[in-house]
């Protein structure tokens, strides 16, 4: 079970988190969702297609992306979060900034999705003082340079150890485990080989006792495997996310919600099959 503010997700089926970028420099939606109205319409379409959670982000974390000021990020995301929350939708705020986390929660977000796993000073407190959930993601290095030379002695052990530490830090700050989600952070300071080892062994992360989220949608690992550009990675993404769900992921973070929903409906039917 996952508690997110006024929502409780039983997690008896995999959930879909739909990506809503309000970032003019985002690698996949660049320039298309700049305006709040467009982002809201896009999010409503994703909800209609079966997204359980809408992940609203105002700062791109792609390798080499420029940082965004707090004011700019707030201006981008708050109107979108408010409008979606007012419609009764479960909204997650994709941010690393404690001030944005607080404002997003006040505006109705029920989850903070942080690629820094709440390591910024004040971030754990921002979540602890609310009833919002948090997604703790692993990243090696900083977005600007993380893909320069990712290195691990044992990627699975290091990612798992880091996530266990962050779960413990949250527990010490009073955030109960049923408000937490963990994420290996595909593509965040990882080579293709690192990403594949993490995906293959995702069930080992699930052993930490917190639901696992997997986000590979449109990422370069899929481009490396298929040779396809970013706008043609939908099928590869479906395969990758189904592989993750088969290894225990309970939430998938995707841009193409309709396709993922179809795939999960088939997957769930197979999992639940019984002879009459
Ligand atoms: N990936 C991106 C952003 N946020 N959050 C979690 N928990 N897990 C991820 O894998 C993850 C994330 C990057 O993807 P995208 O939103 O498509 O790109 P951008 O950062 O350019 O908006």
Image (cartoon, grey):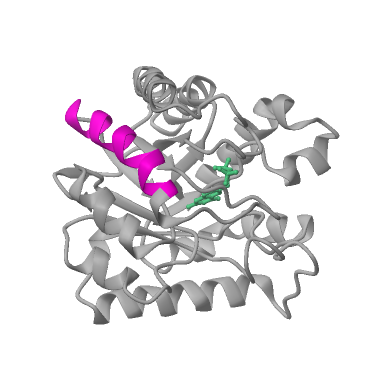
**151 or 129, which is in the foreground?**
129
Classify 131 as above or below 46.
Answer: below
Q: Taking the image as drawn, is residue 1 in sight? A: no
**232 or 252, which is in the foreground?**
232
The residue shown at (47%, 28%) is: 264
**Place of residue 274 in the rendered image (x, y in percent of width and height, measured from the top left):** 38, 27
**Place of residue 13 in the rendered image (x, y in percent of width and height, measured from the top left):** 35, 37
Q: Taking the image as drawn, is residue 77 in sight? A: yes
The residue shown at (36%, 65%) is: 209
The residue shown at (70%, 32%) is: 236
Classify 218 as above or below 130.
Answer: above
Q: Main secondary structure of the magenta part?
A: helix
Q: Quadrant of the C terminus?
A: top left
* Residue 171 relative to residue 60: left or right: left
**222 or 83, which is in the foreground?**
83
- Identify the residue at the far left of this view: 6
> Quadrant location of residue 171?
bottom left
- Identify the residue at the far right of this view: 227
* Residue 203 relative to residue 200: left or right: left
**Place of residue 262 in the rendered image (x, y in percent of width and height, measured from the top left):** 49, 20
**Place of residue 240 in the rendered image (x, y in percent of width and height, measured from the top left):** 64, 40
* Residue 168 relative to residue 39: left or right: left
* Residue 229 relative to residue 168: left or right: right
Q: Which residues are magenta?
A: 72-87
The residue shown at (48%, 66%) is: 116
Classify 231 as above or below 120.
Answer: above
Please say whether residue 79 is one of the residues in the magenta stretch: yes
> Quadrant location of residue 36?
top left
Q: How many marks?
A: 0
**201 or 122, which is in the foreground?**
122
């Amino acid at each position: 079970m996952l508690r997110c503010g006024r929502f409780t997700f039983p997690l008896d089926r995999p959930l879909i988190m739909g990506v809503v970028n309000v970032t003019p420099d985002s690698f996949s939606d660049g320039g298309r969702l700049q305006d709040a109205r467009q982002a809201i319409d896009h999010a409503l379409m994703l909800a209609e297609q079966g997204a359980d959670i809408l992940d609203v982000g105002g700062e791109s974390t792609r390798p080499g992306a420029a940082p965004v000021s707090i004011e700019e990020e707030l201006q981008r995301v708050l109107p979108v979060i408010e409008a979606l929350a007012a419609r009764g939708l479960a909204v997650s705020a994709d941010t690393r900034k404690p001030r944005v986390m607080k404002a997003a929660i006040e505006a109705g977000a029920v989850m903070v999705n942080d690629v820094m796993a709440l390591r910024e000073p004040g971030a754990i407190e921002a979540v602890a003082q609310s009833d919002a959930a948090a997604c703790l993601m692993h990243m090696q290095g900083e977005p600007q340079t993380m893909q320069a030379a990712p290195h691990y002695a044992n990627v699975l052990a290091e990612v798992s150890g880091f996530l266990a530490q962050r779960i413990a830090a949250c527990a010490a700050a009073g955030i109960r485990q049923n408000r937490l989600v963990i994420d290996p952070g595909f593509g965040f300071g990882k080579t293709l080989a690192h990403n594949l080892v993490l995906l293959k062994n995702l069930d080992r992360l699930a052993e930490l006792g917190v639901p696992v989220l997997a986000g590979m949608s449109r990422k370069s690992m899929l481009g490396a495997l298929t040779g396809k550009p970013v706008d043609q990675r939908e099928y590869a993404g479906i395969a990758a996310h189904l592989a993750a769900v088969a290894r225990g992921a309970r939430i998938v973070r995707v841009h193409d919600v309709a396709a993922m929903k179809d795939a999960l409906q088939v997957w769930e039917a197979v999992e639940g099959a019984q002879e009459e």
